[in-house]
Amino acid sequence: MTNKIQYFFLIVGVILLTAGLGAAQDVTYNYDQTVDFTKYKTYKWADVEGSMHPDQLTDKNIRAAVDTELANKGLKKADGDQADLMVGYEVALNQEKQINAWGGPGWRWGGMASATTSTINVGTLVLDIFDPAMKQVVWRGTATKTINPSGDPQKNLKNLQKGMTKLLKNFPPPPAKK
């Protein structure tokens, strides 16, 4: 009987470890492979019509995180109406079930364990970079688990900044090989 209990907790441990790894931010991106991204030097923000945006503070933090990453890539925010690129985003919140399990006193030696489930919000941010001259999106990135409101504003900001760094890691894409 003891082997069965140990096997059960081994399985629960593996599930929890896997769930913890799954909580990491996931990013994907796609881009127009015919575009020469080296020609872009400036950008400005545009609102994506009909998209969902968070509260003003979160919006400000998102824009600041993107601004920082684009500046690190050598792009400058345009002061006037003209810019090489337009940048817009939208967010979505969905919910996932999370399993929380822990062992009671002496669980390794046959003690009892408990498990609960809870619902967590998982935020997805979609960032579109648009070429106004071509009138089309040239780069799109998606980051999940980036907008995940918690009670700690510093944790939220750190998570957002980490997500934007990861999302824009591959922007601009390298020139096409000929």
Image (spheres, grey):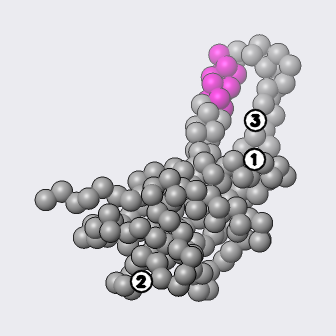
Calculate the distance from the C-alpha at mark 3 to the C-alpha at mark 2.
51 Å
Q: Is residue 21 above or below residue 98?
A: above
Q: Total number of numbered labels?
A: 3
Q: Nearer the viewer, mark 1 or mark 2?
A: 2
The disc placed on residue 114 is none
The disc placed on residue 155 is 1
Q: Considering depth in this image, is 145 or 105 the residue closer to the camera?
A: 145
Say whether disc 3 or disc 2 marks the residue closer to the N-terminus: 3
Where, quadrant-wise, is the C terminus in this rendering? Answer: bottom left
Q: Considering depth in this image, is 157 or 64 the residue closer to the camera?
A: 64
Q: Quadrant of residue 116?
A: top right
Say whether disc 1 or disc 2 marks the residue closer to the N-terminus: 2
Q: Which residues are magenta?
A: 3-13
User: Looking at the image, do the residues carrying marks 1 and 2 touch, with CB atoms under 8 Å apart?
Assistant: no
Task: Please identify the residue farthest to the front as the structure is shown.
Answer: 79
Tell me which amino acid carries mark 2: Pro
The disc placed on residue 132 is 2
